[in-house]
Image (cartoon, rainbow, N blue to C red):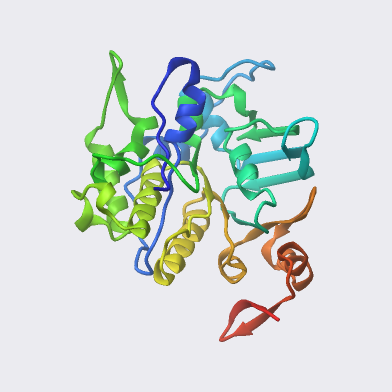
Amino acid sequence: MNFSFARLKPRRLHEAMAAASAVSPGTGASLAGTLPRSKFAARIAGTAQAVTAATPGERIDSATATLAAAHDATLLTCSDLGLRVGNTRRSRVLIEGLNLTARRGEFWCVLGANGAGKTTLLHTLAGLRAPDGGSLQLAGRAMAQWSARDAACLRGFLPQGGDALFGLSTLQAVLLGRHPHSRSQFGLTWESDEDLAIAHAALEQLDLAELADREVSSLSGGERQRVALAALLAQDPLVYLLDEPLNHLDLRHQLGVMALLRDQALRHGRLVMASVHDASLAARFATHALVIVGPGRCVAGPADEVLTDEVLSAALGHALRRVQVDGQTLVVAM
């Protein structure tokens, strides 16, 4: 199932919370709607609080620091970012010299051929691996400066594959997305009434309400994907990072997910970055696009400027052409 939840261990809290943060929104054509706003989101929407600048290497743990930085429009910044795979003797360049500024209200689609580096890029942006060159900032601070809990409130990640949640109901799986916001005492964590209301609202948005009590392992692949998406929606981060969120979904739910992700960006001020293989869906819904064209080279910017016939054809290894049908942009193979 495409949802990852790591067990918390003190010395691996950063990785665990990044995984526990992993889940996301969206589906069906009738899925428009608004979740009850969490206290965290509501406080972010208010006036940002002043915060003393941290010295280099200093960890930021206070919620005040989280809110003040998150209020800024720029949420992700890459400076001369480089990514490689393989060992030091036989490494392969994926991305080189990427400079990128991604802001609230933007929906980025990441495209490229198999093995081009889409997953590696998203893992890096989520803080699950260090870049091989350059620097990465989340809401104006280096990733390492955020406490695990505050970082998990800021960004969530939906991986392609994850742990099987045997024995959990659909509702329990979605509630895992509330973990960064939940109260804890004496090593125990429990959900509030607000957490339950947010989880139920996410199930409603994803047409999963009738499956709330079903065990996750009994669901179809597409239903499990929607559970993972609902958990990230319940997590309510400012930054959504999704690695192929359309996996296993039928056409109706693919369109619904893309519409909901765009809605999260445009109406709710989130930053959404998702890898997709369907260039037509990217052209139809994305405000911005990042296309990995070849070893080391990326083209990034507004979708209408980036998703050209030339760029897509070079990146995907086949002649492609954009056409207009009833006012919608489609990308067709020649």
Task: Name the outermost residue toward the bottom.
Answer: 326
Q: Position of residue 119 (x, y in %)?
A: 60, 46
Task: Name the outermost residue toward the front.
Answer: 89
Looking at the image, residue 320 lies above or below residue 35: below
Choose top left, top right, bottom left or bottom right for residue 142: top right
Would residue 261 appear left or right of 124 to someone viewing this image?
Answer: left
Q: Position of residue 160 (x, y in %)?
A: 50, 48
Identify the residue at horizontal 36%, vertical 55% (top origin). 226
Residue 98 visible in the snapshot:
no
In the rendered view of the protein, which quadrant contains the C terminus?
bottom right
Q: Position of residue 144 (x, y in %)?
A: 61, 23
Task: Name the outermost residue toward the top.
Answer: 186
Q: Position of residue 32 (x, y in %)?
A: 37, 63
Looking at the image, residue 15 lies above or below residue 28: above
Identify the residue at horizontal 24%, vertical 32% (top origin). 192
Identify the residue at horizontal 28%, vertical 51% (top origin). 201
Q: Nearer the viewer, residue 36 or 321?
A: 321
Identify the residue at horizontal 72%, vertical 36% (top origin). 86
Number of numbered discs visible in the structure rendering: 0
Residue 244 visible in the snapshot:
yes
Q: Nearer the viewer, residue 51 or 105?
A: 105
